[in-house]
Image (cartoon, coloured by chain):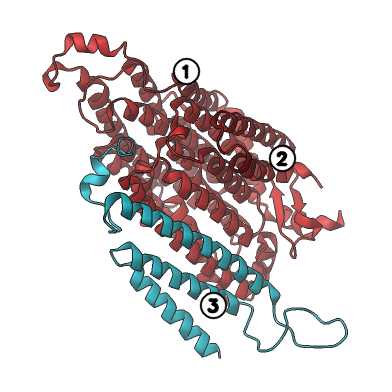
Chain colours: A cyan, B red
Amino acid sequence: MEALLASAVGVLTAAGVFLILRRRTFPVILGLSLLTYAVNAFLFATGRLALNSPPVLNKYAEVAYTDPLPQALVLTAIVISFGMTAVIVMIALGAYLSSRDDRIDMKAHDSVDAAPGEDA
Amino acid sequence: MNHWIIAPIVLPALLAPFIIMVLRYHLELQRIFSVAGTVGLVGIALILTAQAAGGEIQVYELGNWPAPFGIVLVLDRLAALMVLLTSLLALAVVLYVLGSGWDKRGRHFHPLFQFQLMGVCGAFLTGDAFNLFVFFEVLLIASYGLMIHGGGPVRFKAGVQYVTYNLLGSTLFLFALGTLYAVTGTLNMADLAARVAELPAEDTALLRVGAVLLLLVFCIKAAVLPLHFWLPASYANAPLPVAALFAIMTKVGAYSIIRMYTLAFGPDVAITRGLAGDWLLPAALVTLAIGAVGILGSRHIARMVAFSAIASMGTLLIAVSLFTPQATAAALYYAVHSTLAAGLMFLIADLVMERQGGRIAGMTPMPQSGLIATLYFIGAIALAGMPPLSGFVGKLLVMDAARDAGDFAAIWAVILVSSLVTIIGLARAGSLIFWQSHDARHNTEPDPENVDKVEHQPSPEPMPGLAFCAVFGLVAGLVGLTLFAGPLMEYTASMAEQLYAPQHYIDAVLEGDKK
């Protein structure tokens, strides 16, 4: 179980890093998504892996329970990464539609000569 | 409980949705509410600073849950000062935005601006590491919107890079927090500090990994070399008043380093001793050097100011990385100065760009060039650290604090040489922009009459008075910082004293309910 989760996190991270280093925005966004999946699985495991145990204490019996905090953290992280992915997709679309080009790097003259105030 | 502590978060958090939902189509009302909100934030920040000045650490338990279980906000002298600094910079920026009409060039400037303030104030006040992550995300998502305000292909492309880099930083932040939680079982900063101090010395490899990952995240935010690549392109291509507000965002990174590495992984903790300082100092030295070289090499005024922001982060983090109370006091003074100075320079750069574009070269003379040249001169003096303004005092304090450090020769050499390079770079840019434009030999247009006419052209801002008012406000801030350097330095020294006695902080947070 631990080995499976650990290798899954590793593979997801490796794939994410590989995709982030690509030159076009779409693979980069996919890479970011994979990285967030990796970190979500990782966060889930920080409370130790436990099977079939509820994340609540039982007042009436000694029952095994799992740490609820990482689950709350993962929930927050999922919501945030979901929102962030939506934002970057919209900005990347804006960049693509306004320059007809989805390269992630900027041409040399873009950043030096083009005055940011004048390009709107 | 003292409810003022949560006010700097609640006020913008309520104001932003109100503006976006109710005042969507009324720019004038949006402006009134946004300025009123920012003035209110300044008032709240002043109250908080007065309350924190006595030295008592106040804790606000959200939902009245006691400390390690619920999220807490903590008000100490450092947090109060940073909130005050944020609100003052924000006031100058929002007035400038009104004066220059930047908020008309795209939609929803004011709500995003308020959300950004909410994130920044929250990051300064929170006492919980995961909550720090959440406030980082709040300020980042607002900054994504502000960064692409006004649109345009170049700005969108720079925006994609900026968002990508920061999303990577956020992922790293989560990995760091996960590692720390797995080892210590807590994310409350005070509880973290207490548990790190109790950990057995032999089983700490994971903890050190977590601490270094966290340092990396904060270094990304603070734009420390080699993690600074996001800054020049995004600041230079963002609307420049927004870049002026972003001057506080790099300080959030520096603040987090100071907070975490004096509280949880402080210099007295054996497990992580030297972990931050030993790595941070060389990186900060290189950051300062590269920033100075970047100023000299820039061909665009916005990029030049962006590199000067990197250079000032270098100086600031040199002082931080020494981790002595004296150096931290100097760092905090310099942080206040460099935030105001960088904000001022970004606003001046915007004044220049609105008139003649941003290239550092002789161009057609611009209206009001005398006034703007004077402002540029003042800003450049402050930024380069020349007397008589506060940059000089700040650098002097940093160098004085470095005197006892092991490698003080290297620190002094880098600070002094990079100051010289900065002066040359700023002087070169100023001469080209303001003087060569009036030089007949470099100007293709027939000159003498043209120059006379140019001075009487209307300025491009719809309300130039307000815009210049904001710029002069920042200048006044810098002058005040110089005049009151003595009292302020005493105050930052008391702040550093509070930071290097973390037990008070820990006791205040963990025993908040017993009082």
Nearest the viewer among B42 and B188 is: B42
Query: Which residue sits at x=42%, y=56%?
Result: A90
Q: Classify residue B303 as left or right of residue A76.
A: left
Nearest the viewer among B330 and B445 is: B445
Answer with the quarter of the image where residue A115 lies.
top left
Are discs 3 and 2 located on one and the same chain?
no
Pointers 1 and 2 in contact (C-beta within 8 Å): no
User: How far apart in space, not on screen, are marks 3 and 1 (Cα)?
Assistant: 54 Å
The subunit carrying tag 2 is B
Q: Position of residue B69 (x, y in %)?
A: 75, 65
Q: Which mark is residue B52?
A: 2
Q: Residue A81 carries which label?
A: none
Disc 3 crowd rating (10 Å Cα; few below 14, some 14-19, many 20+) is some
Q: Position of residue A73 (x, y in %)?
A: 62, 68
Q: Name the residue under label 1.
A: B465
The nearer-to-camera label among 1 and 2 is 1
Compared to residue B426, the image places residue A112 above or below, namely below
The nearer-to-camera label among 3 and 2 is 3
Q: Name the residue under label 3.
A: A41
The subunit carrying tag 1 is B
User: How far apart in space, not on screen, are marks 1 and 2 (Cα)?
Assistant: 36 Å
- For mark 3, give the secondary structure: helix
